[in-house]
Image: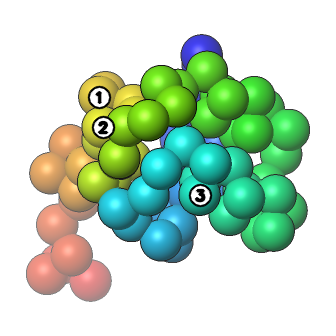
């Protein structure tokens, strides 16, 4: 399983919490690239995922970027 920010961005608006099958269905309906669907198929079948961070633990958060929105 290999995630990038671009691939993960296709699941930002997914219906969390969700099962693997729910996420695969969402990815197909939203037109996500095949790589997203292949990555999701590698997840455990019975687990409920609360967010993208549970699927990709290294997923960057807003705090990881040094961008000060108050300056703009």
Residue under the image location 62 percent in, 48 percent down = 21
Asked if one can make out residue 55 in the rendered structure from this viewpoint, the answer is yes
Q: Name the residue under label 2.
A: 54
Q: Are marks 3 and 1 in contact (CB under 8 Å)?
A: no
Residue 7: percent from the left, percent from the top?
Answer: 64, 42
* Secondary structure type for disc 3: helix
* Secondary structure type for disc 1: loop
Could you say which quadrant of the image residue 16 lies in? bottom left
Q: Name the residue under label 3.
A: 22
Residue 61: percent from the left, percent from the top?
Answer: 25, 49
Give the quadrant of the N terminus: top right
Q: Is residue 65 above or below residue 59?
A: below
Position of residue 44 in the picture relative to residue 61 (left or right):
right
Answer with mark 2 or mark 3, whichever residue precedes in sequence. 3
Q: In this view, does 54 lie above or below 15?
A: above
Q: Mark 1 points at which residue?
A: 57
């Amino acid at each position: 399983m290999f995630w990038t920010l671009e691939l993960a961005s296709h699941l930002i608006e997914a219906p969390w919490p969700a099962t693997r099958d729910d996420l695969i269905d969402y990815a197909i309906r939203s037109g996500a690239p095949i790589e997203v669907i292949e990555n999701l198929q590698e997840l455990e079948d019975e687990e409920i995922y609360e967010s993208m961070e549970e699927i990709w633990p290294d997923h960057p958060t807003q705090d990881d970027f040094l961008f000060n929105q108050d300056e703009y």
